[in-house]
């Protein structure tokens, strides 16, 4: 019944020794939806996100991609299945340009025998970078600009482009606007809309309910390590969501 889900967490749990970081995480991501994951500090959002991203292995529970159970050993594993993640530290390199950062970990090489010498096909990568940035309408000034000289918003743009550009079915973002100003936040939200328009699903972990309501189709609330509810964004108010986060309001679903 859930075969329409791109990515699904079913009762995922993660313990660190005696600490239960996540007791029961349920999350179903539909194709081409923007789906928020919200919750108070320590609710288990980052833990659930890391489990879905392949960065951490669950203690128990199930993870499915397109209805098929998977077991990720690393974010690279997840990426191969079309699940890409923009982590909070972005995982990029300042002294490389935007193109090189887009291709980190999946560089294109010139044909053999030059490939054996580790010689990169920079022209091909640049052309693909220009194409990806254009298709996703991503606000990167130049694919040749060094990352180190970019603003927080531009760096975020390159990280999102990297996650969404190469055959991804889903992009998971951990608080992408946390460090950004008003204008840059608006640009990131636009980028999320463009990613969705390409048919790619987005998981947005955010503390900011205004942006959650501005850009998402559905909202999943976590509280004290458990998924409380998933609702259509249009069906709930801000007060409802705050109530679910704090435990004051439990919806009947
Ligand atoms: N590696 C770890 N070792 C021990 N405890 C951990 C670890 N990671 C998370 N926890 C604990 O698990 C709980 C959930 O943490 P998590 O980071 O998932 O919450 P969060 O919802 O992302 O919170 P925030 O909004 O503050 O980012 C917290 O109590 C945290 O201290
Ligand atoms: Mg967190």
Image: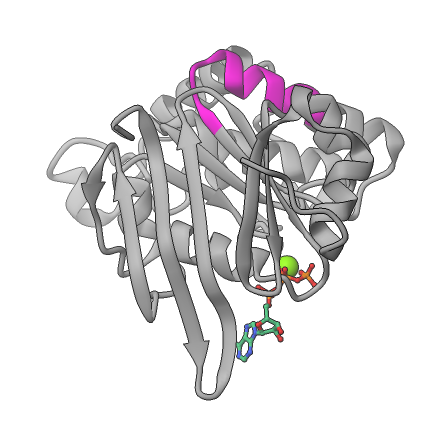
Viewer-side residue, 100 vs 192: 192
User: Magenta residues, as a range?
Assistant: 189-201
Judge left or right: residue 109 versus residue 126: left
Q: Name the residue rendered at 73%, 27% in the picture.
A: 213
Which quadrant of the structure image shows residue 240? top right
Judged from this view, the residue extending furthest toward the bottom is 18
Which quadrant of the structure image shows residue 79? top left
Q: Name the residue rendered at 47%, 39% in the picture.
A: 100
Judged from this view, the residue extending furthest toward the front is 252
Is residue 97 something one can see in this rendering?
no
Query: Quadrant location of the C terminus?
Result: top right
Judged from this view, the residue extending furthest toward the left is 113
Q: Residue 149: say if magenta.
A: no
* Magenta stretch prevailing secondary structure: helix
- Is residue 52 depicted above or below 103 in this figure? below
Q: Name the residue rendered at 59%, 38% in the picture.
A: 252
Viewer-side residue, 77 vs 213: 213
The x and y percentages for residue 227 are 53, 52
The x and y percentages for residue 71 are 23, 55
């Amino acid at each position: 019944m859930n075969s329409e889900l791109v990515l699904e967490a079913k009762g995922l749990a993660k313990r660190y020794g005696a600490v239960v970081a996540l007791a029961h995480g349920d999350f179903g991501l539909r194709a081409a939806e923007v789906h928020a994951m919200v919750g108070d500090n320590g609710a288990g959002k980052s833990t659930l996100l890391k489990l879905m991203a392949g960065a951490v292995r669950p203690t128990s529970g199930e993870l499915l991609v397109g209805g098929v159970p998977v077991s990720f050993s690393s974010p690279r594993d997840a990426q191969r299945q079309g699940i890409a993640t923009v982590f909070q530290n972005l995982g990029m390199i300042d002294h490389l340009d935007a193109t090189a950062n887009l291709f980190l970990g999946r560089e294109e090489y010139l044909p053999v025998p030059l490939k054996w010498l580790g010689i990169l096909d920079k022209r091909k990568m640049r052309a693909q970078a220009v194409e990806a940035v254009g298709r996703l309408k991503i606000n990167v000034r130049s694919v040749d600009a060094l990352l180190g000289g970019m603003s927080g918003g531009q760096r975020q743009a390159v990280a999102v482009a990297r996650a969404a550009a190469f055959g991804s079915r889903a992009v998971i973002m951990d608080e992408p606007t946390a460090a950004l100003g008003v204008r840059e936040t608006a640009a990131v939200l636009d980028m999320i809309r463009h990613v969705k328009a390409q048919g790619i699903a987005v998981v947005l972990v955010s503390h900011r309910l205004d942006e959650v309501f501005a850009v998402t189709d559905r909202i999943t609330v976590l509280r004290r390590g458990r998924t409380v509810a998933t609702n259509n964004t249009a069906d709930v108010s801000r007060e409802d969501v705050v109530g679910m986060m704090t435990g004051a309001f439990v919806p009947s679903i």
